[in-house]
C-alpha cells in the first residue's frame, strides 16, 4: 500500500538536517515541496529526557521526532514527554547501519531481534495512537530479503507509514538501490509505504546537494554560520557542522573549487574565504 501521494518528507540526516538547518533553510525546504521532516535520531534510553535535546528546543509544526533504542519502557517515557511538548507524530529508527549501533540491537539491529522490534512498534502505536507512529528501516542487515520476512509484524500495527531505504545495512549509503526487493516488500505491505530512494517520497541527500545551485546560497550559508556560532561554543564545532554540509556540494562546478579549501579551513575566517 503506497502512502498518500501528498506526503513528501525531508529525510533525517544526523549532523545535517538538524534544527538549526531546518530553521535557516526553511525557505528552500518549503520550495522543494516538503510537507514535513523527520528529526535525526534522538536516543530513547532510561534517564535521557528528549525535551533537553537541542533538536526539540522550540516547537516545530510538521516535525516528526525520531527515536533510536531497544527499550520499550524508555521509548514510552520519551514519547509521553514529546507529546507534552506538542508533538503528534514519532518515528522509530530501525535502519541505522553502523556496526557499533546495530551490533547492540539498535537501529537496523532491531531487524535481527523481531520480538524487540515488535515490542517497540506496539509501544509506539499505543502511546502515540493509531496512525501517529512510523518506522524507518532498510531491506535487511545482510540480505535484502530480511525485511520481507518481517512484514507480518509491521502489518499487525496501525502504523502511520513504514519508510524503506532500499539498501541493506551492509551496503551502508552507496551502490544501487534494490528496487526489485523493494517491490516485493511493497506487495506484502498492508501499511502505507514510503520509498526513501529514487522517485520516492522521502528525500535526503539529493535535496542537500541541490542547495549548491541556488542563487541565494551565499546568503543562506552566511545565515547558517551566524546561527551556528550563536548556538555552539567555539569555532571547532561550528566548522565541523559547516564542513559536513558543504561536503555535499563538491560535485557542483562552483563548489568543486571551493570545497578542497573549505575542507582544510582551521578557522571560520578561513572557511568564509574558501566559500566566497
Ligand atoms: C550523514 C547521514 C546521516 C543520517 N542520519 C540518519 C538518522 O539520524 N536517522 C535515519 O533514520 N536515517 C539517517 N540517515 C539515512 C537517511 O535518512 C536516508 O535514509 C539515506 O541517506 C538515503 O536517502 P537519500 O539518498 O535520499 O539521502 C542518514 C544518512 C546520512 C548520509
Image: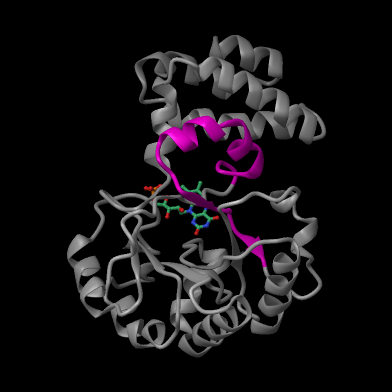
Picture layout, residue 273 above or below residue 67: above
Q: Is residue 259 above or below residue 25?
A: above
Locate residue 192: give its quadrant.
bottom left
Residue shown at 74% from the left, 48% from the top: 58
**Residue 183 on image: x %, y %:** 20, 68
Question: Would you place residue 89 above or below residue 146 in this image?
Answer: above
Q: How many marks?
A: 0
Q: How is the image coloured?
A: one colour
Quadrant holding the C terminus:
top right
Residue name at image x 70 percent, y 61 percent: 86
Between residue 139 and residue 30, name the one nearer to us: 30
Q: Residue at x 24, y 52 (%)?
A: 176
Asked if the magenta segment contains residue 214, the reply would be: no
- Front residue of 157/169: it is 157
Where, by quadrant of the figure, is residue 248 drawn? Answer: top left
Horizontal and vertical percent for residue 194?
Answer: 35, 62
Specify start and end residues of the magenta stretch as a single range.
15-43
- The answer to whether residue 19 is magenta is yes
Query: Is 203 displayed left or right of 273 in the figure?
Result: left
The residue sitting at the left extreme is 180
Residue 205 vs 91, above or below: the answer is: above
Q: Is residue 177 left or right of residue 208?
A: left
- The image quadrant that residue 267 belongs to is top right
* Coordinates of residue 270 in the picture (x, y in percent): 65, 13
* Rendered residue at 27%/72% (across/down): 1
Amino acid at each position: 500500500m503506497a502512502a498518500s501521494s501528498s506526503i513528501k518528507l525531508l529525510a533525517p540526516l544526523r549532523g545535517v538536517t538538524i534544527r538549526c538547518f531546518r530553521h535557516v533553510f526553511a525557505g528552500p525546504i518549503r520550495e522543494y515541496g516538503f510537507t514535513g521532516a523527520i528529526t535525526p535520531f534522538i536516543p530513547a534510553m532510561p534517564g535521557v529526557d528528549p525535551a533537553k535535546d537541542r533538536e526539540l528546543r522550540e516547537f516545530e509544526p510538521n516535525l516528526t521526532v525520531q527515536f533510536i533504542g531497544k527499550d520499550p519502557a524508555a521509548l514510552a517515557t520519551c514519547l509521553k514527554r514529546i507529546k507534552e511538548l506538542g508533538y503528534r507524530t514519532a518515528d522509530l529508527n530501525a535502519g541505522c547501519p553502523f556496526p557499533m549501533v546495530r551490533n547492540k540491537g539498535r537501529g537496523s539491529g532491531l531487524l535481527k531481534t523481531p520480538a524487540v522490534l515488535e515490542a517497540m512498534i506496539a509501544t509506539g502505536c499505543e502511546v502515540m495512537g493509531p496512525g501517529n507512529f512510523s518506522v524507518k528501516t532498510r531491506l535487511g542487515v545482510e540480505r535484502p530479503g530480511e525485511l520481507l520476512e518481517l512484514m507480518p509484524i509491521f502489518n499487525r500495527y496501525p502504523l502511520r507509514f513504514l519508510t524503506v531505504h532500499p539498501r541493506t545495512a551492509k551496503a551502508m549509503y552507496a551502490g544501487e538501490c534494490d528496487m526489485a526487493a523493494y517491490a516485493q516488500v511493497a506487495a506484502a505491505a498492508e501499511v502505507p509505504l514510503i520509498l526513501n530512494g529514487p522517485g520516492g517520497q522521502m528525500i535526503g541527500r539529493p535535496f542537500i546537494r541541490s542547495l549548491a545551485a541556488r542563487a541565494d546560497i551565499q546568503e543562506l550559508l552566511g545565515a547558517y554560520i551566524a546561527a551556528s556560532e550563536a548556538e555552539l561554543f567555539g569555532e571547532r564545532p561550528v566548522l565541523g557542522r559547516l564542513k559536513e554540509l558543504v561536503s555535499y556540494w563538491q560535485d557542483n562546478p562552483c563548489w568543486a573549487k571551493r570545497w578542497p579549501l573549505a575542507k582544510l579551513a582551521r578557522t571560520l575566517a578561513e572557511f568564509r574565504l574558501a566559500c566566497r
